[in-house]
Amino acid sequence: QVELAESGGGLVQAGDSLRLSCVFYGRTFSSYVMGWFRQALGKERELVAQITSGGSTSEADPVKGRFTISRDNLANMVFLQMNSVKPEDTGVYYCATKHISTPDYTYWGQGTQVTVSS
C-alpha cells in the first residue's frame, strides 16, 4: 500500500511562485512514476507534469516553461515548482503515483488547494 501526502498550496498573486511537495510512503519510491494533477472547479482533472523513476520529465502545454517537476529518491519526495502563476492555474493539486509496470495512476494524495488571484 502506498500513501501520499501533499503540502505547499495556498493563496498567491498572479506572477508569484509556489512550490508543492509530496511525500511517498510504503513502497520502493524509485520503482514508481510520480505525477501532479490538478482539477479546477467544474472541470475534469488533468495531468500537469510527471517524472519517471529515471528522472525523465514531461509537462502539459499550459504549464510548459513555468512549472518544473522534480524528485528526491533519497527523501521519497516529489516537487512541483510553479513559477509565473496565472489565475487559470487555480485548482486542487493532487500528487499521484503508479508502479513502473502499471499503465494507470493507482494511488492519490488528498490534494492541496492553490488559488491564484489576479
Image: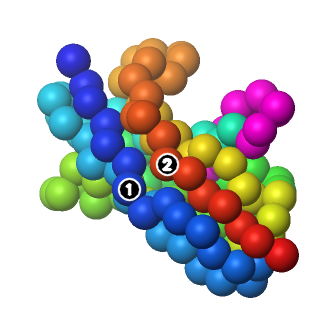
Its colouring scheme is rainbow
Residue 30: tell me if it is visible.
no
Residue 96: tell me if it is visible.
yes
Q: Quadrant of the C terminus?
A: bottom right
Whole-angstrom CA distance, mark 1 to mark 2, is 6 Å
Estimate the x, y position of residue 99 in percent, counting from the top left. Answer: 37, 24
Residue at disc 2, secondary structure:
strand
Estimate the x, y position of residue 70 in percent, counting from the top left. Answer: 44, 61
- Report which quarter residue 18 is drawn in: bottom right
Q: Is residue 89 left or right of residue 16?
A: right
The reply to whether the C-beta atoms of the residues labelled 1 and 2 are less than 8 Å apart is: yes
Residue occupying image coordinates x 76% and y 71%? 117
* Residue carrying label 1: 7
- Report which quarter residue 110 is drawn in: top left
Q: Give residue 35's mark.
A: none
99 over 50 or under it: above or below: above
Q: Amino acid at mark 2?
A: Thr
- In the image, 77 versus 101, the foreground residue is 77
Estimate the x, y position of residue 25 in percent, counting from the top left. Answer: 19, 36
Instruction: Tell me if mark 2 has few (under 14), some (14-19) or many (20+) residues whose alpha carbon lies within 10 angstroms of its own.
Output: many
Magenta segment: 40-51
Residue occupying image coordinates x 18% and y 57%? 75
Residue occupying image coordinates x 72% and y 56%? 90
Residue at disc 1, secondary structure:
strand
* Residue carrying label 2: 112
Estimate the x, y position of residue 88 in percent, counting from the top left. Answer: 83, 58
